[in-house]
Image: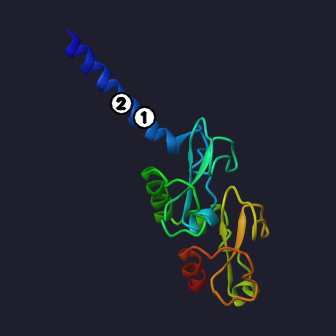
Amino acid sequence: MKFHYLLIVSVFLVEFNQASKWEQCHLPPGRSCTSLTPTSTKLEGLGVYYEEPCHGAGCGFFKPYCRLCWIDPNAPGKMDRPPCPPCVSEHFKEKQSANSQCHLPSERSCTSLTPTSTKLEGLGVYYEEPCHGAGCGFFRPYCRLCWIDPKAPGKMDRPPCPPCVAQILNEN
């Protein structure tokens, strides 16, 4: 009888741990910490996941229970932050494959609205929701100005463009 009880408790603990790994990239419900990660943060090799309670390095990234972590071990912002759980990079790979940054909003994407003068300066625009910091609010609150050409005079502290921006702008 003790063996069956131990087996049931062990199975429960394994299931509970799997659920907590799932929660790291899917909580809070609706708009998870991982899904709200700004593109500029992803481009720096960093990610965000849910942790409650959250204490120490990386905690409080736009919400008290969101922890900043590193995906790329060579990320300049790695510092003393923890590595991201595998679900963070898996989530980003799924989102990147859709190229949603260059095709949203669906009625007229930020990228398709990039003015010719901006393109000629070596700059582009992509969708990012939420959008905070350098380059945000370029003709819409969720459109971020970015650089395609690393020698662009307007590069300043703006992030590099996702690859889809250059592809789309070269087609137009």
In the image, taking residue 52 as reference, residue 110 lies left or right, namely right
In the image, taking residue 163 as reference, residue 9 lies left or right, namely left
- Circle 2 residue: 15
Residue drawn 62% across and 41% down? 55
**Label 2 sits on what residue type?**
Glu
Q: Quadrant of residue 54?
A: top right
Residue drawn 50% across and 64% down? 96
Which mark identifies residue 83?
none
Can residue 68 be seen in this snapshot?
A: yes
Can residue 103 be seen in this snapshot?
A: no
Which mark identifies residue 19?
1
Q: Are marks 2 and 1 in contact (CB under 8 Å)?
A: yes
In the image, taking residue 25 as reference, residue 8 lies left or right, namely left
> In which quadrant will I find the N terminus?
top left
- Give residue 82's position: percent from left, percent from top: 52, 53
Does 142 sit above or below residue 18?
A: below
Dot 2: element? helix
Q: Farthest residue in the top direction?
A: 1
- Give residue 39's position: percent from left, percent from top: 61, 63
- Give residue 163's position: percent from left, percent from top: 54, 76
Packing grade of label 2 (10 A; few <14, some 14-19, many >=20) is few
**Label 1 sits on what residue type?**
Ala
In the image, taking residue 74 as reference, residue 151 lies left or right, namely right
Residue drawn 62% across and 52% down? 58
Q: Nearer the viewer, residue 147 or 98?
A: 147
Residue drawn 59% across and 62% down? 79
